[in-house]
Image: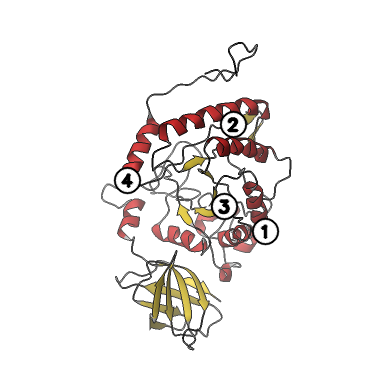
């Protein structure tokens, strides 16, 4: 494909294209049949030689022209499809405070202006990462600045910022405020050492998501992208041997804690299908992680708990998923209380008439289906 404006131009930028079929077209057809949404990837930028985390701006003009051609093709082929939700920004960046002349922000601004002009009204999906490791990462307050910098590149188009929560790579922990001085989880030791959470990290995922939520402007949605794997494998665990780096399989309860860490801020929670960690089996007769998720789909997850009076009576209001009916159990008091009220909005809510007395209270929900939380929610 020539990106020249005319055949008479003295210089032509050529793009060589190879394909083994219409994979995207087939995906759109399948997704529409299932009522699903697709965000095809934007063309990926060339990387700076020797600095692969930065785009090579010598090619930005050609990339922008090519992006326009690709998006015009998307518009012609999929413009009427209910599955075509928008496009995905495939060049990754850290969601931290960035300089005005940051090369990745400049790339985003160029490509996103083309999206806004070619596909008006379609959403731009970006998935930046966070890194809480002391000495290598950045503190939570920078996540809010980073989200604001990202939002300024959208050129008026709707944007969804799906923050990678960092737990799968070991860059960010998922723990409660009562665990700051506790030892890091064993699966994180290969990444940060056998130290406390506070020694290893600036803070947990929940701190970064809360900081980002404070800077979300109109026209932007905050999503959370939970990483469905462990930073390293253990003996006897199914996984992959290639490509590097090696990763490990996680558990349904660990994923529940990641959903819990997203709190009430995430408008949508997603997870990439990291192959093969959702589907591999330690033995032919043992369940995969996907099997565990499917069998535990009704298990409650509490993402927020606050003291709240209702009809003049003191109590606790929790928000989360799969909360309808049942009870809330409070530890260390060892008290179980039946729900006195239930409501449903973007999240489910349940209230019980109880006032905890302990400095830290662990709350376990059991719903009307008899399913209980895999991990308690701890509130001060």
Q: CA distance from mark 2 to mark 3?
A: 24 Å
Q: Is residue 233 left or right of residue 326?
A: right
Which quadrant of the figure contains the C terminus? bottom right
- Whichever of callouts 4 and 3 sits on the residue coming sooner in the sequence is 4
Q: CA distance from mark 4 to mark 1?
A: 39 Å
Give the residue pinned by disc 1.
141
Which label number is shown at residue 45? 2
Which label number is shown at residue 220? 3
Which residue is most to the right? 100
Q: Position of residue 234 (x, y in %)?
A: 44, 50
Q: CA distance from mark 2 to mark 4?
A: 32 Å
Where 50 sits versus 97, above or below?
A: above
Residue at (67, 57) in percent of width and height: 139
Secondary structure beneath dot 1 equals: helix
Residue at (36, 52) in percent of width and height: 289
Q: CA distance from mark 3 to mark 1?
A: 19 Å
Q: Nearer the viewer, residue 69 or 181?
A: 69
- Whichever of callouts 2 and 4 sits on the residue coming sooner in the sequence is 4
Where 253 sits versus 63, above or below?
A: below
Q: Nearer the viewer, residue 371 or 99?
A: 99
Q: Are marks 4 and 1 in contact (CB under 8 Å)?
A: no
Secondary structure beneath dot 2 equals: loop
Res. 315 visible in picture = yes
- Whichever of callouts 1 and 2 sits on the residue coming sooner in the sequence is 2
Give the residue pinned by disc 4.
34
């Amino acid at each position: 494909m020539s990106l020249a404006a005319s055949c008479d131009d003295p210089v032509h930028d050529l793009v060589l294209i190879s394909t083994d079929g219409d994979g995207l077209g087939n995906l759109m057809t399948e997704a529409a049949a299932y009522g699903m949404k697709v965000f095809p990837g934007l063309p990926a930028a060339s990387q700076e030689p020797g600095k692969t985390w930065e785009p090579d701006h010598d090619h930005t003009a050609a990339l922008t022209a090519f992006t326009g051609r690709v998006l015009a093709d998307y518009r012609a082929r999929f413009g009427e499809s209910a599955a075509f939700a928008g496009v995905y920004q495939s060049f990754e960046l850290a969601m931290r405070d960035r300089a005005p002349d940051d090369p990745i922000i400049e790339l985003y601004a160029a490509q996103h202006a083309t999206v806004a002009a070619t596909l008006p009204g379609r959403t731009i999906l970006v998935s930046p990462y966070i890194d809480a490791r002391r000495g290598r990462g950045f503190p939570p307050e920078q996540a809010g600045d980073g989200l604001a910098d990202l939002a300024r590149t959208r050129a008026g188009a709707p944007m969804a910022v799906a923050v990678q929560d960092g737990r799968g790579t070991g860059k960010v922990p998922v723990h409660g405020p009562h665990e700051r001085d506790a030892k890091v989880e064993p699966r994180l030791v290969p990444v940060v050492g056998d130290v406390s959470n506070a020694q290893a990290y600036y803070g947990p995922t929940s701190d970064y998501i809360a900081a980002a939520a404070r800077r979300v402007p109109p026209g932007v949605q905050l999503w959370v992208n939970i990483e469905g794997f462990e930073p390293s494998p253990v003996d006897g665990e199914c996984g992959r041997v290639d490509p590097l780096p090696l990763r490990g399989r996680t558990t349904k309860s660990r994923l529940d804690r990641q959903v819990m860490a997203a709190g009430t801020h995430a408008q949508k929670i997603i997870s990439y299908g990291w192959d093969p960690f959702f589907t591999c089996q330690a033995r032919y007769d043992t369940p995969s992680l996907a099997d565990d998720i499917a069998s535990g789909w009704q298990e409650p997850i509490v993402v927020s708990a606050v003291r709240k009076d209702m009809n003049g009576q003191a109590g606790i209001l929790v928000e989360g998923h799969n909360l309808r009916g049942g009870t809330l159990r409070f530890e260390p008091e060892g008290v179980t209380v039946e729900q006195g009220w239930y409501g449903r909005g973007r999240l489910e809510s349940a209230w019980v008439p109880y006032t905890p007395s302990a400095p830290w209270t662990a709350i376990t929900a059991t719903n009307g289906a008899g399913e209980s939380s895999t991990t308690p929610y701890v509130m001060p």
